[in-house]
Amino acid sequence: MPGQPDPFELFGLTEPSAAADPGTGSAPSPSPPVPPVPPSRPDDEYVTIGSSGGGGGGGRRWALLLGVPLLVLVLLVAGVGLWLRGQIDPGSPGDEVAFTVPSGATTSQIAGLLADARIVSNATVFQWYVRWKGGDPFQAGSYDGLRTNMDMGAVIDVLKEGPPPPKPVFFLVREGLWIGEFIKLTLEKFPTMDPAALQKALLTTHPPLQPAGSSNLEGFLFPATYELSQSEVGNAQVLIDKMMAAFDRTAATTGLADASAKLAGVAGRRTITPYEALIVASLIEAEAKVDADRPKIARVIYNRLARGEILGIDATVLYALQQRKETITSSDLRTDSPYNTRLKNGLPPTPINSPGAESIEAALNPAPGDWMYYVLYQTDGTHYFAKTAAEFERAKADAKARGVF
């Protein structure tokens, strides 16, 4: 039966003295005679194996045989370690990423979502890392501060902190909007809001200065920037209540409720009620382009009311038409509407927009003067105020010649 192959021969690790002659293939020449071993002494119990001599080659061969796979194992472990390090910390973080943990999501599902968003490089490694570092379960919600290619330890730190409080929503309502425009703007801003609920809130909310029996909130939807929590978004009544509260604060600050006393005699024998002062404020809001003109426009309105002359304010015609346009035609001016102050004497029946605090203040504190007319005179929106029709016509012609309008 042939002998078993030498394992060292398999790895090419045999010594030259033990190998066949490569040139002839003949067996190796006999080794020189081994000197006789001296007889051991009676008290020798152990044999000391030296590092030299015939037995040393075998030891080196076994060391090499064991060392090669050990080296391969070390290199393999080092490679895996480098790979894991690269997965855990892939380098410089990238752009911030919006990330939401769904309600009831497991750590495994969260890891998959993080990998999909490229926040972590490997979902499986992240799961193992979480088991080692701890910190889960993670709270549902939207998180800030997560970036692409982020260190997994930093990701865990962010998730352990939990989602920040929901951000409020800010809603800007500018001056001079009609109720129809406000409704359109609101439903665009809050697509989850029920239009029917908004209409109901507008019809059933009654501020103290609203005339009895009226359901028209035109003029009361105070222009401002409103802050709503996430739980308030889409709630029509909450929004309208906030706007009513803002109006009430402005009314208190300006003294709108005391309009009759503040404006005694300003319109001749006519008493100006708080609601009528609000109507005047809406006319000022529609006409004024610069703040300095507001009290003067108020004075022109009161002077014309005192003399019983029509106001002739084109903004009321546009409100009657419910159209925003630059040019008013002669047919527009003949529109039969109680809002058309080109045809109807006195104030329109309701405000024609939502005036801001400056216009309300001007309506309650008109500038002294006996002007009866005003016309746009400068490109910055400044008006010229005239006492007579002839003066008005001259200023109008001058402004038109200069290309103001």
Image (cartoon, rainbow, N blue to C red):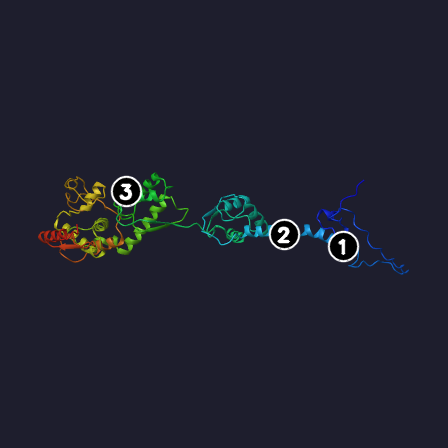
What residue is drawn where x is 77% and y is 51%? Answer: 18
Which is more N-terminal, label 1 or label 3? 1
Q: Mark 2 or mark 1: which is in front?
A: 1
**Toward the viewer: 33 or 151?**
33
In the image, is residue 264 above or below residue 179?
below
Q: Mark 3 or mark 1: which is in front?
A: 1
Q: Quote the CA–CA distance across marks 3 and 1.
A: 101 Å
Identify the secondary structure beneath mark 2: helix
Identify the secondary structure beneath mark 1: helix
Task: Give the labeled residue for mark 1.
Answer: 57
Task: Give the labeled residue for mark 3.
Answer: 180
Q: Quote the CA–CA distance across marks 2 and 1.
A: 27 Å
Q: Position of residue 380 (x, y in %)?
A: 21, 55
**Toward the viewer: 341 or 402?**
402
Is mark 2 in CB contact (under 8 Å) with mark 3? Answer: no
324 relative position to 94: left or right: left
Q: Position of residue 38 (x, y in %)?
A: 88, 59
Which is more N-terminal, label 3 or label 2? 2
Dot 3 alpha-carbon crowd within 10 angstroms: few under 14, some 14 to 19, many 20 or more:
few
271 relative position to 246: left or right: left
Task: Give the labeled residue for mark 2.
Answer: 75
Q: Position of residue 145 (x, y in %)?
A: 46, 52
Q: Mark 2 or mark 3: which is in front?
A: 2
Looking at the rendered structure, the kind of residue marked 2 is Leu
Looking at the rendered structure, the kind of residue marked 1 is Gly
Which is more N-terminal, label 1 or label 2? 1
Looking at the rendered structure, the kind of residue marked 3 is Gly
